[in-house]
Amino acid sequence: MDDNEKLIEQFMKQSRQEIVDDGFTERVMRGLPEHQPQYEWLPRVWNGVMILVALILFIAFGGVSLVKNALVQYLDSAMIQGIDMRWTLLLMVLYICFVCHKALKTA
């Protein structure tokens, strides 16, 4: 916690005010309906279906061969230019891990 956060926290503690509501908040909270998770599964199913559709379209329109050709061209040019392949492969693995991590984090 840095100095700015400490100053803000101190200011908030000093200027805190309680508002008397004669139990209004509690009555409102009791009157609210219980959370009903009846459709929580729907976004997950929808995401799964859309990922499947995207994968099918990727394969159907030759995306695999495009990625393979681009990778082969990159590796060929890297070898011709004398780039150390260990660093290239390490960067590719790190990038794939990053993409997978972000995909799993958002799912």
Image (tube, helix red, strand yellow):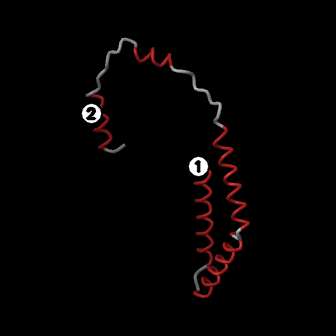
Q: Describe residue 57's horizontal placement relative to residue 23 as left or right.
A: right
For badge 1, the amino acid type reads Lys
**Residue 7 appears at what percent x and percent y?**
28, 38
Name the residue rendered at 41%, 18% in the picture.
25
Which quarter of the picture shows residue 74? bottom right
Query: Disc 1 or 2, which lies upstream in sequence?
Result: 2
SS type, badge 1? helix
| Alpha carbons under labels 1 and 2: distance apart | 35 Å
Name the residue rendered at 58%, 49% in the picture.
106
For badge 2, the amino acid type reads Phe
Seen as rendered, the residue at the extreme bottom is 80
Image position of 100 with respect to 19: above or below? below
User: In the rendered image, which residue does mark 2 sit on?
Assistant: 11
The quarter of the picture where the N terminus appears is: top left
SS type, badge 2? helix
- Using the image, tell me which numbered label, if any, was put on residue 63: none
User: In the rendered image, which residue does mark 1 sit on?
Assistant: 105
Q: Nearer the viewer, residue 64 or 79?
A: 64
**Residue 31 appears at what percent x and percent y?**
50, 16
Image position of 100 with respect to 69: above or below? above
